[in-house]
Image: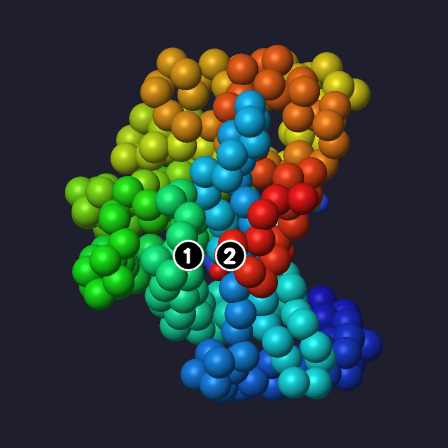
Amino acid sequence: AKRGGRDRWDTAGPEVLRTAAERLDLEHELRIAISDGELELHFQPIVGLTGQRVIGREALVRWRHPVRGMMPPVAFLPVAEESGLIVELGAWVLRAAVRAAVTSQEPGYVAVNVSPNQLLRPGLADQVHLVLAASGLEPGRLVLELTESVVLSTAPAAREELERLHALGVRIVVDDFGTGFSALSYLRDLPVSGIKVDRSFTSGLGEDPRCDRIVEALAGLGRGLGIDVVVEGVETEHQAALLAGIGVEHAQGYLFGRPGPSYELLPA
Ligand code: C2E
Ligand code: CA
Ligand code: CA
Ligand code: CA
């Protein structure tokens, strides 16, 4: 077994080392990028399905890398998560997103993605409180998007932090709803004011009847619990019409507008 293990390592060795070195480089560069202003936020509208009024904007981080060019979150968030840099990155995103919302003339909310690692560290509620106080943004105009994870549903500290955020008047929504763990216990146990239905259900609308039924059920769940339901990843008029028929009120997707560098940019 030892020999087999070693053979495997020998074969994978150079590859692994290269990757590890690259990750270290990226981590080092990301640390500098955060303080040097290489991160940017793009904003994507969240709209009302009837009338297509913009009700909010989701902030999505990008890294304008001096050599590699514009990098999507998938290219650096994993490194940020593993290195712990996500805490610093998240703090920057929060400040920048709130500043953009205050500067814009738009009355809607700004939605910020929060990683479980940010929430597991104590102090997020304090941080949010400070940012809101310094900016003057009404707490109800800040939405924190939280991805389902096993950790959150079991860690009492995370739950306490969420209660404190809720007490500030900030809204908490469960992102990518339906794809993770403990989805329903989240709605029972945590101060959640909305869900975002994952794009994987949207893409099957009108094609896979199961997707239609699931989205219908989630819309009903939202109505029953009195929480907001936003359906993500709407790309076609057909999907939008089906959603309106089901009674879904809020949506987000390329059909209404792609993420863009300008907050004010009206949906396409
Ligand atoms: P997410 O929170 O589910 O964000 C939605 C993603 O779907 C965004 O990708 C957005 O550009 C994309 N999208 C929106 N509408 C459509 C559509 O109609 N069709 C398709 N195919 N895609 C659509 P993006 O910007 O690459 O972000 C990917 C993920 O990275 C986000 O998924 C979120 O989990 C994470 N992320 C982005 N910004 C932040 C951040 O500031 N902090 C943290 N912790 N995570 C972030
Ligand atoms: Ca999100
Ligand atoms: Ca999502
Ligand atoms: Ca996602």
Where in the figure is residue 133, as x and y percent of width and height? 19, 60
Where does the image place residue 265, in percent across and percent down from the top left? 57, 53
Comparing 224 with 186, the one in front is 224
- Queried on whether the Cβ of the residue with tag 1 lies below 8 angstroms from ligand 1, the answer reads no
Do the residues bearing badges 2 and 1 touch, measured as CB atoms within 8 Å?
A: yes
Q: Residue at left 41%, top 66%? A: 96
Identify the amino acid type marked 1: Ser
Identify the residue under disc 1. Answer: 104
Q: Which mark is residue 263?
A: 2
Residue 58 in the image: state x and y as whole percent: 49, 49
> In percent of the image, x 75 and y 19: which residue is there?
206
Mark 2 and mark 1 lie on one chain; the one further toward the N terminus is: 1
Q: Nearer the viewer, residue 118 or 136?
A: 136
The C terminus, quarter of image: top right
Instruction: Name, please, the residue furthest toward the front.
Output: 105
How many numbered discs sit on the rendered protein?
Answer: 2
The quadrant holding residue 150 is: top left
| Cα separation between marks 2 and 1 | 7 Å
The residue that appears at 42% across and 57% down in the rendered structure is 104
**131 shown above or below 172:** below
